[in-house]
Structures are given as structure tokens and as C-alpha cells.
Image (cartoon, rainbow, N blue to C red):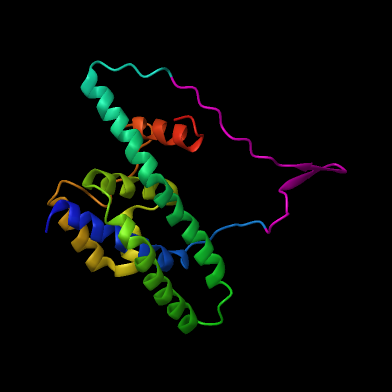
Amino acid sequence: MTKKRWYKILILFLFCAVGSQAQKLKINILPEGVQRAYIDGKDTVPVVNLQEVFIFPQVRFKNKREQEKYNKLVRDVKRTLPYAKMVYETLIETYEYMETLPDEKARQAHLKRMEKDLFKEYKPELKKLTFSQGKLLIKLIDRECNQSSYNLLKAYLGSFRAGFWNLFAGMFGASLKSEYDPKGKDAMTERVVILVERGLI
């Protein structure tokens, strides 16, 4: 099995894993139209979260190869970030919907339908990802969900099969347990993600 094919299969498993993992999350979600606030004496003070402001120094490239590498990272982030965000949104939506189902049987039936729909909808697109884009997507899923790909697979496939996939990943120099490191080795990726999220590149 080639690297590229392995990553495509793994990513499809991850997309399906989000439904199973969602039922184990505890998420505080405010109803629509409700504003966080606190009481100060007789006053009600709203709590508003302002978006952080990031200021980055200009990127200076030593040579053309470095610039091409950066341009490729920008392209790959733009291609994969929407999928990582979709995984997180699916976790939230699935958790909310699962809470409304009457019993475990209904929940499992919903997860099976969801798995089938996800494969049908996203398989054609995910098959077009390159090997490097597949590796990046696994990192970005960890960034968005605060869960490693290994943990998502473990929730869906169980410990043994998740361990098998991680062992298999190791044969290609990857680890599903590796964590996204925005202040270390993934600092440049984090910079690009922030700029892409704000529509600046």
C-alpha cells in the first residue's frame, strides 16, 4: 500500500470517527440569542470575546526554494483547513443531536447513517489530497478538535485497531499520536492558518 493511499484511507476513517467521539464530549453551548454576562452589584455586565490581534514580522526567504516551500504550505493549508474545521463542527452538531435521541440503539443507528453519508459526500474530494496534504490535515484536525487523530480513531475503531493504524503510520515516518505544536515545529503552519482564517493571504 502506498503512502498516498494509506493516508486517504486513514482520513476517511477520521471523518467517520467524529460521530462516535462526539457522544463522549462534554460541551458547554449557549442557546442562540443568549449572551454571557456577570452581575456586578446591580448591573449586568456582558462578556464579549474579542478576536486576538496577531502581528507577524515579514517573512524573509533565504532562497527561491524556501519561498516555494512557504507557498506550498499556504496552498495546502487553504485546501485542508476547511476539512479540519468541518470535523470540529460535526463533533459539535453530532453531540447536540445525540442528546435528543431516546436511547443507545437510536444513537448507534444515527452514527451508522452518518458514517455512510460522510463516506458518500467526502470520499471523492479526500481522494484528491496529496500525501503532504493528508499529513497536514491530520495535524489540523488535532489543532481544531484538541484531539489527536489516534484518539479519534480509538473512539471509533477501538484501541487495538487504532494501535495498528498508528504502527502502520510509523512505517512511513508518521505518528497519529503526535500533537500540533503551534509554538514549536508547527509555528510557521500556525502563522499561515491564522492569516488564512483572517483572509489575509
Above-or-below relation of 100 to 96 = below
Above-or-below relation of 171 to 25 = above
- Residue 84 at what x, y percent from top left? 40, 50
- Residue 186 at what x, y percent from top left? 33, 35
Above-or-below relation of 162 to 43 = below
Residue located at (69% from left, 40% from top): 48
Residue located at (47% from left, 60% from top): 91
Front one among 96 and 69 = 69
Q: Is residue 56 visible?
A: yes
Location of the C terminus (image quadrant): top left
Front one among 65 and 50 = 65
In the image, 6: left or right of 77?
left
Q: Is residue 186 visible?
A: no
In the image, 10: left or right of 27?
left
- Residue 16 at what x, y percent from top left? 36, 65
Say how many tags the image has: 0
Front one among 151 and 196 = 196
Front one among 102 and 109 = 109
Above-or-below relation of 185 to 41 = above
Q: Which residues are magenta?
A: 31-56
In the image, 166: left or right of 51?
left
Residue located at (25% from left, 15% from top): 62
Q: Check residue 169 for magenta coloring.
A: no
Location of the N terminus (image quadrant): bottom left
- Residue 71 at what x, y percent from top left? 31, 30
Residue located at (28% from left, 23% from top): 67
Please tell me whether the stretch drawn in magenta is mainly helix, strand or loop.
loop
Task: Specify the quadrant of the image occupied by residue 165.
Answer: bottom left
